[in-house]
Image (spheres, rainbow, N blue to C red):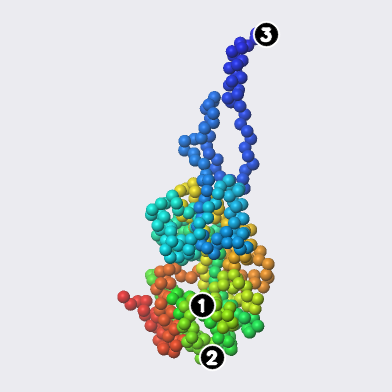
Amino acid sequence: MKLLDPILILLLLSLAACGGVFPAPNTPLPFEYPQPALTVSAPQATILSPTASPHPQALRIWLPSQFDPSAGTTASDFLQARLDQFGKRRGIKVEVRIKAVGGPGGLLDSLTSTSAAASLALPDLVALPRDLLETAALKGLLHPFDDQTKAMDASDWYDYSQELARLQESLFGLPFAGDALVLVYRSKVISVPPADWATTLKSSNPLFFPASDPQALFTLAMYQADGGAVRDDQSRPYLDPALLSEVLAFYAGAREVGVMSDGLAQYQSSEQIWEDFLDNRADWVVAWSSSYLGNLPVDAGIAPIPTPDGKPFTLVTGWLWALASRQSDRQELAIELAEFLTDSSFLVNWTAAAGYLPVRSSVLNGWPDPSLKVVLNQVAISARLYPTSDILSSLGAPLQQATVEVLKVQKDPVTAAQDAAASLTKP
């Protein structure tokens, strides 16, 4: 047999070394992301495609102080653990910045200024209340999720959550916390809270609500529960004077029997009402569900607000994760994080600890208190998103004025309702 030339042998060995076997791929992560494209030209080394780029090494999220993962509360610990879990699985760092909700330097103000001056410094995800999400989206500061996620296709989202998530037919946020108007009562004083107006008028205890609330949300809830529309056939702000007069007549009747008083005109916010309840100056109040769930007073219960016919109805708002980054590669990973943070398995513990109305029925089903679950499910099923900012800004003042005028006996219910409705058509 003819022996191979020594030079040929060396050449073959050299080529074998350059074209060696690639190592086996790592086990896939629970959250898979596209791997960079590879181009191989033997005998050269493997190189990245010129168009490929690695996934971001960090994601930025903005949060208000009540959701600060470093706050040292049970809820914050749950959130920090969730962020750490995502970061570990993805091999990235999740950077958190805390912002005020409103005012200079707040969430909306910071989004506006950063978008104009340093868009690369925008957060990838930002937690926004519904009203700020609406404003930010209309100003072009947010990017819709739309076809980039199927998270909202799940059947366990409450109807109000679907309303929270959408603006002008686009999906602008993934909801993670709800907050609804509810009735909170002192159980040793009121054994069974009234469900309808007629039963409410038979109570011997004064009902507290912020009559001078600039948005008049309780009066608006009563009006909508009675079937009142807030837009006319041309989508302009609208009040039905006949239905509004029924609400105001309920107030007048409640004043006559001592269930309401002109003293309610001094209250402009639910926070003031809640302070009176905690200080034992009120035995039943209209408050936000988060006030009750965040405190869980041992001597208090929660119920749907009374309505004309006893059928549950309430107004709701909430918090959502929104996309702010303009970079597509960062958006992809940010959407995964938003989905991870709105998964039921996480929200079960977090919403219970943070004191917020669950946005998904599967989340509420995981709560431990059976009686609380029954009431909150009634609230969540009957909840409807309160009107958009343009409607609220138009309806708030006339509704507030009519409420105060009737409680102070300055106008009768019919006149106050007609004046409120007519004010919307004045130039």
- Considering the image in quadrants, where does the N terminus appear? top right
Residue drawn 65% across the image and 8% down it: 2
> In the displayed structure, would residue 363 be above or below residue 421?
above
Provide residue 31's location: percent of width, then percent of height.
59, 48
Considering the numbered disc 1 on the image, is that residue within a helix, a strand or a loop?
Answer: helix
- Considering the image in quadrants, where does the C terminus appear? bottom left
> In the displayed structure, would residue 409 be above or below residue 315?
below
Q: Which of 144 and 216 is in front in this view?
A: 216
Please identify, in this view, whether the residue under mark 2 or under mark 1 is nearer the observer. Answer: 1
Q: Nearer the viewer, residue 398 or 73?
A: 73
* Residue at the extreme top of the image, as rendered: 2
Q: Label for residue 272?
A: 1
Q: Distance between the residues labelled 3 and 2?
A: 118 Å
Q: Nearer the viewer, residue 35 or 299?
A: 299
Compare marks 3 and 2 and give the one earlier in the sequence.
Answer: 3
Dot 1 crowding, Cα within 10 Å, few <14, some 14–19, many 20+:
some
Amino acid, disc 3:
Met
Dot 3 crowding, Cα within 10 Å, few <14, some 14–19, many 20+:
few
Provide residue 275's location: percent of width, then percent of height.
55, 77
Compare marks 3 and 1 and give the one earlier in the sequence.
Answer: 3
Q: Label for residue 347?
A: none
Residue drawn 51% across the image and 77% down it: 272
| Circle 2 residue | 257
